Image (spheres, helix red, strand yellow):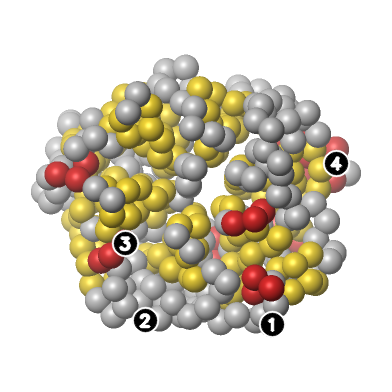
């Protein structure tokens, strides 16, 4: 299964506020203040990042399959979501997309309305194209507030970046984003069912395009990857350094410098990432705001030299090789569907958002 997605990284403790029942979940109504990054865990459990509430939620969708295969294709899904919620299209914002591996259904995190009064909504889409808001009135859930979270509402460095991406890996939820601490860029490792991950680990990276070490720029998207049988996190940042981090190095109370293995071009924001295998070789598929969708070779990344010196402005890219997939334009979200396919959310030149299934390139 492909899994979505670190200047300074801190692993710090989270408090479980919902009493533990089976799987650490208790039936009730999650007090979601916003719905941002998504990731699936075991047995149809959906993890939801609440940036406004600076909390992580685990919600049992009850969607355990079966997964009968097939593809997903919905044109104008933003219009259909708006219709299902009883508002105009300009009154909704789709924040993230995740595929439930148990069923193959797509889940969308949505903001209904604008500004502080916007409501958090989870919408699911099945193979027939049916768009259905998920009722949150009485669902099994648990909540973990993020410690040392930003308290401001500023667009950069505030609560809007308290959670930038998340992924479920080997029994833990990894949450990227910013804290209110001096080394603000971090990644939290939260055991599931939610528990105490212990003291934090700090990590810095070298950004070749900026010619300096960075500790305040959050990872934008990341994915889990195995290198010689050992778990790593591959992380992409604005402007666009690609960094590898061995999970084993993220020891409580220690400091670790991540290895920058590629500079993929400046004036760009990475949006989403999956890792996959094709023809016996590993690749990373990375969607970007300004530089299209990149197919990055993972072969040899274990021995790739660290980028630790400035990359000239006229060079733009350096390190691990990649190619831009010309046929994939307007991709704003993606997630793995199966070993050969991914589901993408594409914005066309008229502003419509379409869900489609693509062959992994």
Residue denoted by label 1: 19
Q: Residue sitting at 39 percent across and 50 percent down?
A: 224
Q: Nearer the viewer, mark 4 or mark 1?
A: 1
Residue denoted by label 2: 199
Q: Residue sitting at 43 percent across and 68 percent down?
A: 189
Circles 2 and 1: CB distance less than 8 Å? no
Circles 1 and 3: CB distance less than 8 Å? no
Point out residue 172 in the picture as x, y percentages from the top left corner. Answer: 47, 65
Mark 2 or 4, nearer chain start: 4
Image position of 149 with respect to 292: above or below: below
Q: Residue sitting at 67 percent across and 38 percent down?
A: 67
Point out residue 29 in the picture as x, y percentages from the top left corner. Answer: 79, 69
Q: Residues within 10 Å of mark 3 (few under 14, many from 20)?
A: few
Residue 206 sits in which quadrant? Answer: bottom left
Cα distance between the residues tagged 4 and 1: 33 Å
Mark 4 or 3, nearer chain start: 4
Judged left or right of residue 280, residue 327 is: right
Residue denoted by label 3: 247
Cα distance between the residues tagged 2 and 3: 15 Å
| SS for dot 4 | helix
Image position of 41 with respect to 284: above or below: below
């Amino acid at each position: 299964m492909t899994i979505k997605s670190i200047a300074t990284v801190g692993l710090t403790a989270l408090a479980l506020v919902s009493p533990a029942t089976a799987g650490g979940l208790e039936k009730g109504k999650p007090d979601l203040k916003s719905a941002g990054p998504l990731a699936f865990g075991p047995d149809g459990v959906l993890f939801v990042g609440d940036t406004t509430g600076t909390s992580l939620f685990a919600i049992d969708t009850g969607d355990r399959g079966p997964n009968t295969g097939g593809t997903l294709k919905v044109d104008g899904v933003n219009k259909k979501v708006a219709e299902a919620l009883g508002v105009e299209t300009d009154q909704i914002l789709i924040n993230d997309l995740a595929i439930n591996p148990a069923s193959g259904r797509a889940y969308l995190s949505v903001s209904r309305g604008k500004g502080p009064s916007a409501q958090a909504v989870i919408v699911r889409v099945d193979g027939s194209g049916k768009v259905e808001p998920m009722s949150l009135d009485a669902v099994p859930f648990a909540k973990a507030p993020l410690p040392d979270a930003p308290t401001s509402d500023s667009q950069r460095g505030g609560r809007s970046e308290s959670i930038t991406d998340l992924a479920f890996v080997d029994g833990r939820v990894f949450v990227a984003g910013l804290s209110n601490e001096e080394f603000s860029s971090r990644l939290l490792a939260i055991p599931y069912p939610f528990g105490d991950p212990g003291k934090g680990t700090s990590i810095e990276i070298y950004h070749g395009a900026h010619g300096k070490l960075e500790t305040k720029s959050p990872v934008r998207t990341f994915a889990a990857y195995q290198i010689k049988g050992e778990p790593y996190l591959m992380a992409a940042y604005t402007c666009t350094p690609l960094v590898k981090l061995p999970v084993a190095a993220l020891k409580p109370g220690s400091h670790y410098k991540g290895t920058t293995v590629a500079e993929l071009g400046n004036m760009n924001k990475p949006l989403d990432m999956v890792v996959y295998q094709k023809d016996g070789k590993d690749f990373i598929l990375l969607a970007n705001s300004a530089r299209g969708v990149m197919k990055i070779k993972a072969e040899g990344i274990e021995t790739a030299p660290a980028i630790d010196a400035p990359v000239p402005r006229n060079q733009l890219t350096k390190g691990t090789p990649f190619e831009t997939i010309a046929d994939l334009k307007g991709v704003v979200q993606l997630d793995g569907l199966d070993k050969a396919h991914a589901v993408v959310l594409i914005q066309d030149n008229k502003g419509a958002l379409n869900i489609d299934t693509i062959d992994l390139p």
